[in-house]
Image (cartoon, grey):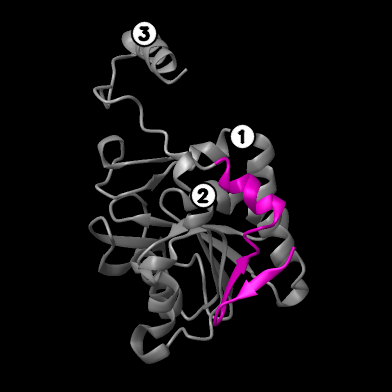
Amino acid sequence: MRARDRENHFCLDQNDAAVRAIAAALPWYGPEYSPHDVPSFYDVSGITENPEVFRAVTELFVARYRAQGEAGPTHIAGFDARGFLFGPPIAMALNVPFVMIRKAGKLPGVLVSSGTYVTEYSTDETVMRLGSVKAGDRVVLIDDLIATGGTALAGFNLVDQLGARVHEFAAMVSLPFLDGVKKIHEYADGKFKDVPCFTMVDDSTIGPEMCRDPPAGTPRVVAAGDAARVSAEIDAATA
């Protein structure tokens, strides 16, 4: 599968059948039916609830790093929370540790903090367990999506401050119009400009046909006892 190199941003060919299959399994929702006020919120459960596509996504990541041999990553680090979906199976396949980068207040023990940072949603702080990575380690940072790059840069700084090296940042979906990869490479006068970023699917490949907003007036949250009725109403309205 051929990848395009956009100034150290490696993105899979958007016309490839495997990429198209991933895009066709990624529904999105508008602001009224999303946890955040964004135009398109991609629902990663479209991947995790489809074993065939989930396996294909995992295998694409694994093949990339396995091909690097002894020069490949020594650790996979996933961002809270959707990086936790993709990171562990990749780490297990490569037989390397999986490291959690969690939001503040979630991990026990002695922690290392990123400090606060700004994302497209909020102001956050992430932490890693002290000792989870060390000098000489080569760490792949993985998340489901890259938008503005704020979360990614928090991970870059954590790994860098602990003496390890970010081997690559990887995400399943890229929103190129938000320039997240560019912001990573321009950060701190180009401190991380030589770190590759790898993404699989551009948001434009997913397309408007993947919107799954229900009919207007459908409640955002329903009681469990009403689930069957509301589901039937949605099915009837969209049949």
Residue 182 sits in quarter: bottom left
Which badge, 3 or 2, is on the more N-terminal residue? 2
- For label 1, the crowd category at 10 Å Cα-Cα, with few meaning under 14, some 14 to 19 and many 20 or more, is few
Question: What's the amino acid at mark 3?
Answer: Arg
| Residue 193 location (% of width, % of height) | 48, 85
Locate residue 101, reporting x and y percent.
42, 59
Please tell me how crowded label 2 is: few (under 14), some (14-19), or many (20+) other residues with Cα within 10 Å.
many
Instruction: Determine the residue positioned at 52% across, 37% down.
Output: 46
For disc 1, the marked residue is 50
Q: Position of residue 109 (x, y in %)?
A: 37, 56
Relative to residue 27, is residue 178 depicted above or below? below
Q: Is residue 95 visible?
A: no
The CA span between labels 3 and 2 is: 30 Å
Q: Which residues are magenta?
A: 1-25
Q: Residue at x 52, y 43 (%)?
A: 26
Q: CA distance from mark 2 to mark 1?
A: 16 Å
Q: Residues within 10 Å of mark 3 (few under 14, many from 20)?
A: few
Answer with mark 1 or mark 3, whichever residue precedes in sequence: 1
